[in-house]
């Protein structure tokens, strides 16, 4: 596969200020304190009730400058949620004009090269060739290298699905509980300390509780988006994303059709 390129359908929230690190660490479900400059990490952003606001990638661009890129249309909700807890913290945030350029395919990392804003690509299949040969750049549009063959955002969505990474707004619904997402083990730290929504996450984890619905991966060839999933003649879920290899579906509790997103 040659290098493919797409401007991904993502909103980018810029967070900066002397207290940016400590503020984000206190608000996000993931441990932000150890993210170094030019590094990135995935995190859930939750309401105090524990319900999902967004699944965000946090990129540290400079000592006191971070971005949170989230699925398109969620930027304002992220700013609104974070703004509730700023209090006296020296931090500002806004939906920026930054964009996310995605590159994948053989040689993508080498073609893109090193620089500010490079970010790891979210995936639950970290050993796959697709994942290892992918990189994103979060930043000013004009600064991104023009390499690779441009593809549509529909193709990017299929790429994202084949990496078994969920989309908030289709696979994950705003207001879902974290256990539904299937990615808490990579988007939540269970050792970092307090953050809004922690109580629900910890309670379900400690009790081994199952969510009423959980995301699972199925073989893509059998499904289209919106299809009802059946197991032993019973309707057990609905397909929400379809790629070349995998489909993602919201499956009811008690049914183990397909595989968990994280293996």
Image (cartoon, helix red, strand yellow):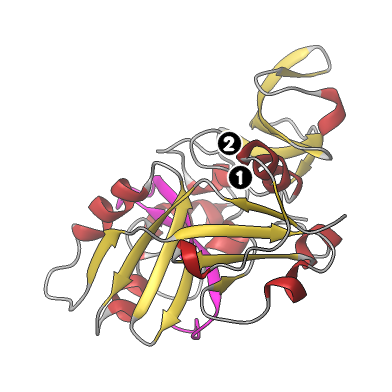
Report the span colored magenta.
29-57
> Contact, CB < 8 Å: mark 2 with mark 1?
yes
Q: Position of residue 187 (x, y in %)?
A: 55, 61
Instruction: Specify the quadrant that holds the C terminus.
Output: bottom right
How many residues crowd around disc 2 within 10 Å: few (fewer than 14), some, or many (20 or more)? many
Q: Residue at x 55, y 67 (%)?
A: 144
Instruction: Specify the quadrant that holds the N terminus.
Output: bottom right
Residue 74 highlighted magenta (yes or no): no
Q: Which mark is residue 166?
A: 1
Q: Position of residue 256 (x, y in %)?
A: 77, 35
Q: Quadrant of residue 103?
A: bottom right
Q: Residue at x 73, y 30 (%)?
A: 255
Circle 2 residue: 171
Q: Is residue 216 left or right of residue 34?
A: right
Determine the residue located farthest toward the left in the rendered image: 88
Q: Is residue 67 left or right of residue 35?
A: left
- Secondary structure, mark 1, is loop
Could one spot residue 30 in this view of the protein?
Answer: no
- Secondary structure, mark 2, is loop
């Amino acid at each position: 596969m040659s290098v493919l390129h797409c401007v991904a359908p993502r909103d980018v929230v810029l967070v900066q200020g002397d207290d940016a690190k400590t503020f984000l660490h206190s608000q996000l479900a993931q441990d932000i304190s150890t993210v170094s400059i030019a590094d990135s990490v995935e995190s859930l952003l939750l309401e105090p009730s524990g319900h999902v606001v967004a699944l965000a990638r946090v990129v540290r661009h400079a000592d006191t400058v971070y971005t949170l890129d989230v699925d398109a249309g969620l930027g304002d909700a992220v700013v609104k949620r974070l703004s509730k807890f700023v209090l006296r913290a020296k931090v500002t945030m806004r939906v920026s004009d930054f964009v996310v350029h995605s590159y994948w395919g053989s040689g993508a990392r080498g073609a893109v090269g090193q620089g500010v804003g490079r970010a790891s690509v979210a995936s639950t299949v970290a050993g796959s060739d697709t994942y290892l040969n992918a990189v994103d750049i979060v930043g000013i549009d004009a600064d991104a290298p023009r390499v690779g063959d441009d593809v549509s955002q529909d193709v990017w969505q299929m790429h994202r699905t084949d990496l078994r990474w969920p989309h908030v707004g289709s696979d994950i619904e705003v207001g879902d509980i974290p256990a539904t997402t299937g990615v808490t083990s990579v988007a939540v730290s269970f050792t970092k300390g307090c953050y809004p929504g922690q109580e629900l996450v910890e309670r379900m984890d400690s009790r081994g509780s199952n969510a009423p619905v959980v995301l699972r991966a199925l073989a893509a060839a059998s499904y289209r988006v919106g299809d009802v999933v059946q197991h032993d003649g019973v309707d057990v879920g609905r397909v929400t994303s379809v790629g070349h290899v995998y489909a993602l579906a919201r499956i009811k509790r008690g049914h183990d059709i397909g595989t968990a997103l994280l293996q």
